Structure formats: structure tokens, C-alpha cells
Amino acid sequence: MKRISSRDNAHYRELKRLHASARERRRSGRLLLDGMHLITAYQQRCGSPLEIVISDSAAGRREVVDHLANCPPAIPVTQLPDALWGELALVDTPSGIMAVAAWPQPATTIDLAADTVVLDGVQDPGNVGSILRSAAAAGFQQILLSADCAQAWSPKTLRAGMGAHFQLAIHEGGDLPAFLTSYHGQSIATAVGAAADLYSAGLAPAVAWVFGSEGQGLRAAVLAATQLQVSIPMPGDCESLNVAAAAAVCLFETVRRRHPAADGGG
């Protein structure tokens, strides 16, 4: 095990760059996974990480000790003082364990006939991660993000996704109008005031749900390329839903239509 005690250490500075810089993550093809849940999810789908990083205060925790004991011996382990660890942590109560991992790449090219979630300019990492989590839970495995979305693989987005990333084929920086124009299924956008409502609209066997930015909604070119616009009925006194909540409603309405028995429970 290697211990780092100085902020000037070259390897620690490298970890800081991975934490803070989307450009560095893209350049190096590596990610920081914060917490045992994310590390385990990565291992189950993608294999072993490149490195484990732990804090002094976590070194004696049973789950950390057990995890290190079960790691392949070739995986390096780095230990940091709590003060240095805190500069990498995302939350006030740090997990005490991180992993440096290779950036998973989609195994396939974009499928023009697959169920898809399309995100146009969704800029909050928490919203992107929550939508990815809902997509994975609903069985939507293909994700397309415009170039101005929050980075799918940032530490904050990964944390909000709770491991869903590793079940998905995530394509960033896509040409959304081109995809929607060529899509072989039904592309649907949510829009306040749309004539059709979610619960009465017909859904095709394959659908691409399209969600826009928190403030501006969908760009005109993206909206124009969709085949159907629907509104989500809101009997309460509220103008709109958070984009992550709207996505969850639409995705699970799709699940309900396809699995009617799921709607009959008490």
C-alpha cells in the first residue's frame, strides 16, 4: 500500500485533476468512483478498477478491509490523510473509499430501432444521473446526450446514477436532430401545453423519449424532429416538473403500458 501525505505529490495532483476536470477524464480515459456501491457496480459489469484509494479514517472499517482483501493483488492501493481525502470527496460524510477506473465505452454503435432516452442540454449533473438511474430501472439501455449536457461520467453524475451507468450504452455529444430524423421508432417530447397528454397518447413498440434543459426546454431543431409532443397532466397548482421527475413519469408510463399486470397490484 502506498501512502501520500503531501498535496504536492504528483499522484495526488493527478487524482485532483480527475476529480475536477472533464477534459482530464476524457484525455486519460479514466474515472473516479466514489463509494463502495459505485465500485461494486463497476466491478460487476466492467471488471476490476485500476486503483483503490482510501482515507486514513476508513482504513480500519470492516467493509473496506474486506474489500481490499478480496481485490486482486495487482491492483495498487493508495492511502490518504483525511484532510487530503476531503478535497476529493463529494459529500460532507465521505465514503472513505474511491476507485480509479477505465472509462467504459459503448459496446455498440447507435441503434436506430432501440428504446432510447435523449437528453438535450440537461446541465445539472444530479438531474442527468437521476434520469440515467430511471432509464436503467425502466429497461431503456441506450442514452444520447447533446454536447451541452452535463458530462455523464463526472463524479457528481456518477453518484446520482447510483451504478446505473454501467448498465447503459451512453453516447455523448450526439447530433440529436439527425438521430431523431432517422429513428425507426416513435420519438416523443414532453412539452407544457401540448395537445396530447401522456396517458392518452399511443406509444409505439420502440420509443425515444426526448427531454430538454431545465430552463429552456428543447431546442427548436430538436423539438421539430420529434414525431409527437405530450404534456404530463398536473392537477395541482404547478407549472412544470423537474426534468428528472418528468423523465421518470414518462419512462414508467411506458413500462406500465407494456406490462399491464404491473398495474394491478395493491
Image (tube, rainbow, N blue to C red):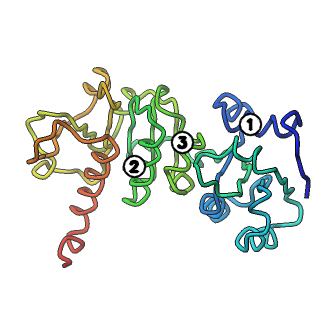
- What is the CA distance from the residue labelled 1 to the residue labelled 2? 38 Å
Q: Position of residue 224 (x, y in %)?
A: 25, 25
The residue type indicated by label 2 comes to Ala
The residue at the far right in this view is 2
Q: Position of residue 266 (x, y in %)?
A: 19, 79
What kind of element bears circle 1?
helix
Residue closer to the observer: 129 or 94: 94
| Image point (79%, 72%), residue name | 70
Q: Is residue 224 left or right of residue 199?
A: right
Q: Is residue 179 visible?
A: yes
Q: Is residue 96 left or right of residue 264?
A: right
Q: Is residue 31 visible?
A: no
The residue type indicated by label 3 comes to Thr
Q: Is residue 232 left or right of residue 72?
A: left
| Image point (8%, 48%), residue name | 235
Residue pointed to by mark 2: 114
Q: Position of residue 228 (x, y in %)?
A: 19, 37
Residue pointed to by mark 3: 109
**Mark identifier at residue 16:** 1
- What is the CA distance from the residue labelled 3 to the residue labelled 1? 32 Å
Sequence-earlier tag: 3 or 2: 3
Q: Quadrant of residue 137?
A: bottom left
The residue type indicated by label 1 comes to Lys
Q: Quadrant of residue 154?
A: top right
**Mark identifier at residue 248:** none
Q: Residues within 10 Å of mark 3 (few under 14, many from 20)?
A: few
Q: Residues within 10 Å of mark 2 (few under 14, many from 20)?
A: some
